[in-house]
Image (spheres, rainbow, N blue to C red):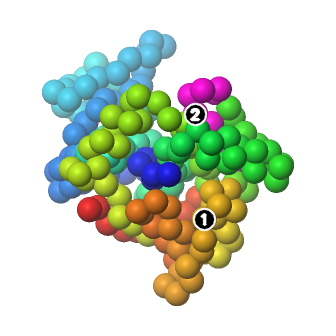
Amino acid sequence: MYLFHYHLVTSNVRQVEARYLGKLGFELVARYGRIGEQRTSFEAGRSWEELDRIGFKLRLTELQRGAVNVVVQPGQWEVPRVDHFGFAMDDDVYERTLACADQIGLRIQDRPGRRAFIATRAGYRLEVHPQRDWVDELLAAREQLHLGELQLRADNPQAKAEAMAELLGAPITNGIGAAVPVGDATIRFLPGGPQGRPELIAELFL
């Protein structure tokens, strides 16, 4: 099982995007949105000034480097908050995770054979993917870059960690906050954050 994706919501989309592109060396996959009523997307090569001139309204920005995929979506919070985490799984682990979510009574948005979203009741969702060619290709890029750790601030770190650990069949490590090791990455929930979606405060890439 691999953590390869996280989806951020922030009022500072352009600044957050610029950090990933400039400081962290990510590439722009595309900006998705609308011009008027028509959905459209733009890959790298179009400036924000040009997009503003043609009336482009952003829905989300997708960025990638190595085996890490990040999406940034406009929202109300200055400090980015995590809407969901994306995991690639073996087929049997995928089915077991969905069965666990169903047994607990969690809401599942299932797109059979493609992916599923699970609402955890802890303020964030999990996006889980079975084995697919594009996931294998993405994970093949792990030597270029992969996630080592995400640090998030939350109102109740233990509850946030327990919700994830229960679904993924993962342990919880207590010490500095409550941490859930998943594959070779760690998701660490720290105190002092908001209710609902946790705030992203640090990333470790390897």
The CA span between labels 2 and 1 is 20 Å
Magenta stretch bounds: 111-119
- Across and down, in percent, residue 179 comes to 53, 74
Q: Which residue is located at x 41 percent, y 48 percent?
A: 4
User: Quarter of the image holding residue 148?
Assistant: bottom left
Q: Nearer the viewer, mark 2 or mark 1?
A: 1
Residue, far bottom:
175
Residue under circle 2? 115
User: Can residue 57 be seen?
Assistant: no
Q: Which residue is located at x 55 percent, y 36 percent?
A: 130
Q: Is residue 75 above or below residue 78?
A: above
Dot 2: element: strand
Q: Which residue is located at x 16 percent, y 27 percent?
A: 45
Along the line of sight, which residue is nearer the eye, 44 or 144?
144
Whichever of callouts 2 and 1 sits on the residue coming sooner in the sequence is 2
- Across and down, in percent, residue 24 comes to 21, 55
Dot 1: element: loop
Residue under circle 1? 170
Disc 1 packing (10 Å; few <14; some 14–19; many ≥20): some
Q: Is residue 166 above or below residue 178?
A: above
